[in-house]
Image (cartoon, grey):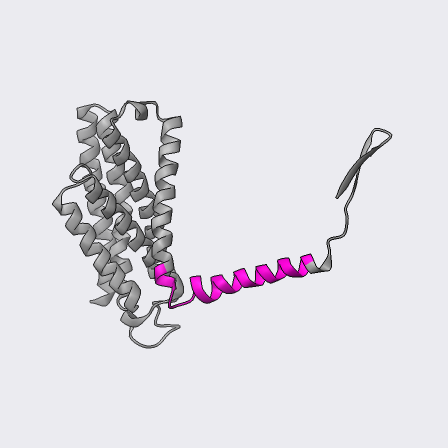
Amino acid sequence: MFVYWTYGIKECIIMPVPKETVMAIKSYQVQAQMLVRDYLLADPFLPYTSVLGGIFACKMAYDFTQLISSFYFKKYSNLTRIQQIEWNNRGISTIHAIFITAMSLYLVFFSDLFSDHYFSGLVTFRSSPLSTFALGISVGYFIADLGMILWLYPSLGGTEYVVHHLLSVVAVAYSMLSGEGQLYTYMVLISEMTTPGINLRWLHGYFSSSTYSTMFTCTMIRSNSCIHMAVYWSLWCPLC
């Protein structure tokens, strides 16, 4: 492209792109699409790709939480280094909880994957690329969070956190790799909807009075109990 001025008016001349260059660009695009379709998103590689994607997403969520908090929360800079790390870590868990809860609700209640009207066979053996991908993201989160807990042990959690994350990684990874029991795995993961409230309770513990914090805790306990009862009642009663 050439740019020149004529009577004070800027004019541009767009030179035609050589045909060889256009063909080369299209060739690279086709190769990139084949790489994504045949390898990154292919069934044999999808679990591993999604796990790596989950770990990478946790890193992005950590940096995003740190960036937003430093601009919009004045008291964030007054926290100690460990408290800031825990703050950012809870940002990761909140984002993961929102994602996996949305996916669980969709796959269990709205998707046709586990519906008897569209598929035959045992529901415990049903899976799809989407359901496997979402579980892989969750496995990546648990691995990343477990790594942070062990690295800063016991600042981010004690033995109970380590055991919880190990069991979660094993259970979700087995369902992801084998394709078995994904319905029941998502039924359990729906309970992650309480995680944002728990993290909000942690924030109020730092920024509010003890009386308000106690009232907020009682409210969260009641709401979490109601949510768990409603979820399991709606899921298990039809199976009885």
Q: 20 above or below 125?
A: above
The structure residue drawn at horizontal position 77% and vertical position 48%, both measured from the top left corner, is 15
Q: Nearer the viewer, residue 193 or 56?
A: 56
- Residue 32 part of the magenta-drawn span: yes
Q: Give how far across and how far down residue 179 sits, in percent.
A: 30, 68
Q: From which residue to which does the magenta span run? A: 21-48
Q: Position of residue 201 (x, y in %)?
A: 23, 34
228 w.r.t. 76: above or below: below
Q: Position of residue 211 (x, y in %)?
A: 17, 25
In the visual, does 2 lie left or right of 69? right
Near-viewer residue (58 or 11): 11
Residue 4 position within the rendered picture, expressed as x and y whole percent measured from the top left: 80, 35
Asked whether 104 or 234 is in front, the reply is 104
Q: For residue 238: magenta?
A: no
- Quarter of the image with the N terminus is top right
Horizontally, residue 240 falls left or right of residue 123, namely left
Q: Main secondary structure of the magenta part?
A: helix
Please report the residue visible at 33 percent of the width from the left and 61 percent of the height from the top: 108
Looking at the image, residue 10 sits to the left or right of residue 225; the answer is right
